[in-house]
Image (cartoon, grey):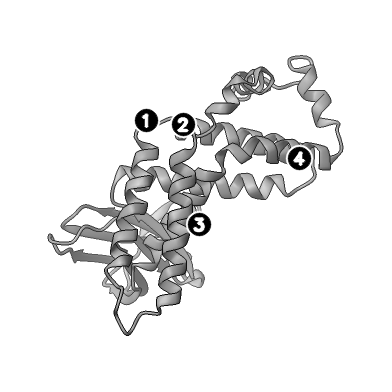
Amino acid sequence: MVLYEYPFNEGIRTMLRLEHLFDRMAGLIARDNPVDHHYALASMFEIMDVAARADLKSDVLKELDRHKQQLLSYRGNPAISEAALDDVIGRIDIAFTSLNESPGKAGQALTSNEWLMSIRSRIGIPGGTCAFDLPAYYAWQQYPAEHRRADLMRWTDTLTPLSTSLHLLLGLLRESGVPHKVVAIGGQYQQSLTPARTYHLMRVRLPQEADLVPEISGHRLMVSIRLMKSDSEGRLRPLAEDCAFELALCS
C-alpha cells in the first residue's frame, strides 16, 4: 500500500514539512559521502527557514498539551492500560519541557556561527558552494566521514527538542485515526464530516499495484478524493473504474 497524507490546516502542513526535512536530514547524516553531508546541511538550513514562523513553537506546545488532556481523560477506563497511558503522558511531558525550555526559534543558536551562515547564504545559489567560493567549506568536506558526522550531530542537536516533539505529536495524531475500507465509485470519493468534530489530518492508503495518484481536497465539512492514473506519456488522467482503498481521519 502507498500512503498519502492530507493536512486540514496550515499548522499541521508545516509540521509535516518539518517531519519530512528531519527524516531526510537524519538519513543523509548517517551516510559517509561528502555530497550526502552537503545536502544534510541544506536540509538543516531548510528546517531553520520553515521553523522561523513565529507561532510554530507555541502551536506545537498547544497540540502536545491538547493530546495530554485527551489522554488524562482516559484515566480509570478499564479498557486502557494505565502503564501504557503513563508512558505516553511521560513522553509528552518530557518533550513539552524540552521544547518549552529551548531558547528562541529552532536553530537560533546556529545563527551566531559565521562559518555556517556563510554556507547558508550561498547554498541556494546554483553552484554557489564551489571550492573557489567557499574554500573553508571545501576543506571541511575533505575531513573523514566521522569528523563531519560529529560536527553535523553537534549542530543539529539544537534542533532535537523540536524534532522529538514533532515526531511524538504527529505519531499521536496518526494513531487517533482508525483506517476503514471505502470505495471510489468511478474513481471519485466524497465524505461529509461531522461539524462538531475537528479533524487535522487525512490518511489515504492506495494499493501499490494500481499505480494511482490521489487528488485530495477538503475542509471541515467535506473531503473529496479523485483517483488519477498516468498515461504512457506520464500525464495524469482520471480513473474511470471503481477502486477500494483505506481512509483514516485523524483528530
Alpha carbons under labels 2 and 1: distance apart? 8 Å
In terms of sequence position, does the residue under pointer 2 or pointer 4 come before the other?
A: 2
Please tell me the numbered disc located at residue 232.
3
**Would you say the residues marked 2 and 1 are in contact, meaning their CB atoms lie under 8 Å apart?**
yes
- Is residue 230 something that shows in the picture? no
In terms of sequence position, does the residue under pointer 4 or pointer 1 come before the other?
A: 1
The one of 229 and 34 positioned closer to us in this rendering: 34
Q: Residue 181 location, x and y as percent?
A: 33, 77
Q: Which residue is mark 2?
A: 105
Q: Which residue is mark 4?
A: 150
Q: Which residue is mark 1?
A: 54
Alpha carbons under labels 2 and 4: distance apart? 23 Å
Alpha carbons under labels 4 and 1: distance apart? 30 Å
Please report the residue visible at 83 percent of the width from the left and 24 percent of the height from the top.
Answer: 139
Q: Nearer the viewer, mark 1 or mark 3?
A: 1
Q: Is residue 113 above or below residue 75?
A: above
**Would you say the residues marked 4 and 1 are in contact, meaning their CB atoms lie under 8 Å apart?**
no
Q: Residue 208 location, x and y as percent?
A: 50, 69
